[in-house]
């Protein structure tokens, strides 16, 4: 038995009897299923939110660590066992688990009789969960180190972000919904700066890593196993193996934000860790938020709107609290926020399905959780360094937040209302590679058809899209911005073939491509011309596409004319296409069809708008219509 397995078993052995037995029973069942059915995929995929897992395995110290030792990897809502995982290792660990079971098992009833009442009572399974909350509350104080904050500020291009916040004032007002702005520009700029900081962090500073590249042959690696070390700054070391040459590459999962300022890579835990530190270094009241179904993000207190604003650096998402439930289809249970001042259970900000969430909150009683939070908050707020003035402010702010939870999340309708607007706002996940997100079910498949409409009094209508910003704007003949819309799929009429925006963090490129499960993909942008406009003088298209390995991108124009006839034009050069043949159109559609490519990565060989991730102001698509 290797040392890491022995460590996990020792952790299991230290749990209370009932918790240990529950965890062992589940782990043995998992091992048994894999050994008996090594080719059956359902036994290699375990949902984190599954009641058995969340109630009986997660509360046990060493339980999840044993899953990692078996070869499972964490993929958000699921633990997944890769196809190349060693079955012999599973057999060896199963034998060790069986020995621990035979040695330690007792037959305490699952629901013993409460002697005072004669009724059954459920044995509490909360010690591990409560310890996690306590540890997280203690660790958040690392963001208050003044020397670390000063060091952190040196990594942030503060002046650049300030200028960008001022330049994009109108765009950011729409994005962060400052409906309650009190007219104080200083407060307004603080929130706009936060949006710029979020965009910069996502696109220029931090990098998402699923698996590292091989340093020998530069081919992709895949997860092989975890190694654990006795280092408070490291949660574990992931070992990934090259698919081509077999070389092993290490990916260290650091928990120390100071180290992460230099490495600048990881998954959601690392991203939120560093982004929260940066917010604190810049003077924001910020707290790190842990979702028990496996995601981490940041909340920032907005002085302008007097509320906590959801801020997800992995997704470049701000003030979108229903992103996870509606966009990612997560089955939420416990979402806890930690700041220097307090712990808060913020689950109710992120759900509109309260009854379903309550049923999943079964690790402990609500009273026990509230009692723990109150005790830890009292200890922190009654410490010598906590002033009475600060305490009064924190208490007042907490009461405001609790009152906020009585209403739907900010900007959202009541649960009984039509959900169409929210479906437009909350899309699928964008962080992580496409296959990873598809496997998690976090790519949104719902798209609301959108058609651009030309105002009656224009001489020139120009629609532009910027792939790096993921932003549309509409301009007139004087280059005045008339309309803006975030997110590429919110400005198209039809999407087919799983088209998505892909960010290659290794190559620092971004583009649109079809999904890996589709042989073709199609996008249609449409513009309606009002009846008041007599005719179209000219139509012009400027855009780009990139193809590899026999892939094809076909562009065409289709119009519906005022006499109900159709005009179809094939585009041979999308970089500059101009025509006067659409003068009688009442609707014009620009169509891009993606197909071809070779091998497993064929989906990636036909790309729209491929641009370097730092080409922020590069226009990817421009449609210009001159009118009479």
Image (spheres, grey):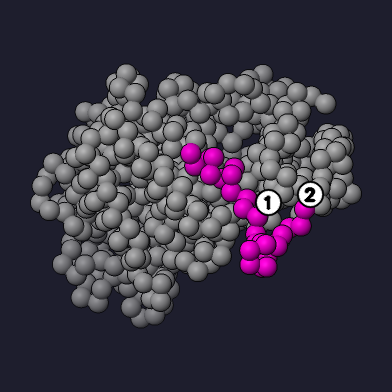
The residue that disc 2 covers is 25
Where 296 falls versus 330 (above or below)? above
Query: What is the tally of numbered marks visible in this picture?
Result: 2
Q: In terms of depth relative to the viewer, which is nearer, 354 or 35?
A: 354
Q: In terms of depth relative to the viewer, which is nearer, 465 or 410?
A: 410
Residue at image coords 20%, 58%:
179
Let me know if residue 128 is in the magenta part.
yes
Q: Are marks 2 and 1 in contact (CB under 8 Å)?
A: yes
Task: Provide residue 258's location: percent of width, then percent of height.
Answer: 42, 22
User: Which circle's residue, 2 or 1, is located before the other in the chain?
Assistant: 2
Let me know if residue 617 is in the magenta part.
no
Q: In terms of depth relative to the viewer, which is nearer, 579 or 561?
A: 561
Task: Provide residue 203's location: percent of width, then percent of height.
Answer: 40, 36
Residue at image coords 25%, 73%:
530
Dot 1 falls on a residue whose secondary structure is helix
The residue that disc 1 covers is 56
Residue at image coords 75%, 23%:
3
Region rendered in magenta: 108-134
Left or right for 517, reference 418? right
């Amino acid at each position: 038995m290797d040392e890491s397995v022995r460590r996990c078993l020792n952790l299991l052995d230290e749990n209370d009897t009932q918790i240990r037995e529950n965890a062992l029973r589940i782990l043995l069942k998992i091992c048994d299923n894999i050994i008996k059915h090594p080719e059956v995929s359902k036994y290699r995929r375990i949902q984190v939110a599954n009641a058995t897992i969340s109630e009986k395995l997660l509360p046990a110290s060493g339980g999840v660590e044993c899953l990692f030792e078996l070869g499972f990897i964490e993929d958000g809502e699921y633990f997944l066992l890769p196809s190349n995982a060693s079955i012999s290792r599973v057999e060896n660990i199963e034998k060790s688990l069986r020995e621990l079971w035979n040695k330690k098992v007792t037959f305490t009833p699952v629901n013993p009789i409460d002697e005072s009442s004669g009724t059954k009572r459920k044995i509490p399974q909360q010690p591990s969960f409560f310890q996690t909350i306590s540890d997280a509350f203690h660790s958040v104080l690392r963001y208050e180190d003044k020397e670390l904050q000063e060091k952190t500020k040196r990594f942030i291009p503060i002046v650049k972000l300030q200028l960008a916040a001022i330049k994009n004032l109108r765009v950011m007002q729409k994005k962060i919904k400052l409906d309650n702005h009190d007219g104080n520009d200083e407060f307004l700029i603080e929130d706009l700066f936060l949006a710029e900081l979020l965009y910069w962090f996502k696109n220029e500073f931090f990098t998402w890593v699923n698996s590292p590249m091989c340093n020998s042959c530069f081919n992709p690696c895949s997860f092989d196993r975890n190694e654990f070390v006795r280092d408070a700054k490291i949660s574990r070391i992931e070992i990934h193996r090259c698919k081509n040459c077999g070389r092993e590459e290490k990916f260290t999962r650091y928990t120390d934000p100071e180290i992460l300022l230099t490495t600048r890579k990881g998954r959601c835990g690392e991203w939120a860790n560093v982004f929260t530190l940066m917010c604190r270094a810049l003077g924001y009241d910020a707290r790190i938020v842990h979702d028990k179904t496996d995601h981490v993000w940041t909340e920032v207190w907005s002085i302008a709107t007097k509320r906590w604003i959801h801020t997800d650096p992995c997704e470049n998402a701000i003030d979108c609290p229903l992103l996870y439930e509606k966009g990612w289809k997560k089955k939420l249970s416990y979402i806890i926020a930690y700041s220097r001042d307090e712990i808060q259970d913020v689950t109710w900000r992120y759900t509109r399905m309260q009854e379903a969430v309550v049923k999943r909150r079964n690790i402990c009683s609500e009273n026990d959780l509230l009692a723990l939070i109150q005790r830890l908050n009292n200890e922190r707020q009654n410490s010598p360094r906590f002033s009475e003035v600060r305490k009064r402010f924190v208490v007042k702010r907490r009461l405001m937040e609790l009152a906020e939870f009585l209403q739907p999340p900010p900007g959202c309708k009541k649960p009984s209302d039509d959900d169409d607007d929210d479906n437009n706002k909350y899309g699928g996940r964008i962080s992580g590679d496409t296959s990873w997100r598809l496997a998690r079910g976090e790519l949104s498949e719902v798209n609301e058809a959108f058609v651009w409409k030309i105002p009656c009094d224009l001489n020139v209508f120009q629609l532009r899209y910027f792939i790096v910003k993921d932003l549309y704007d509409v301009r007139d003949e004087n280059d005045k911005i008339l309309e803006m819309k975030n997110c590429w799929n919110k400005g198209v009429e039809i999407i087919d073939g799983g088209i998505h925006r892909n960010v290659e963090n290794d190559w620092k490129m971004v583009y649109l491509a079809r999904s890996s499960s589709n042989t073709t993909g199609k996008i249609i942008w449409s513009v309606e011309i009002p009846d008041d406009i007599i005719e179209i003088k000219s139509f012009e298209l400027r855009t780009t596409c990139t193809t590899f390995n026999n892939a094809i991108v076909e562009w065409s124009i289709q119009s519906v004319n005022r006499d109900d006839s159709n005009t179809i034009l094939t585009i041979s050069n999308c970089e500059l296409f101009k025509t006067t043949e659409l003068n009688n159109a009442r609707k014009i559609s620009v169509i891009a069809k993606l197909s071809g490519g070779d091998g497993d990565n064929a989906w990636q060989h036909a790309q729209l708008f491929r641009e370097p991730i730092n080409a922020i102001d590069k226009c990817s698509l421009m449609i210009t219509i001159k009118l009479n």
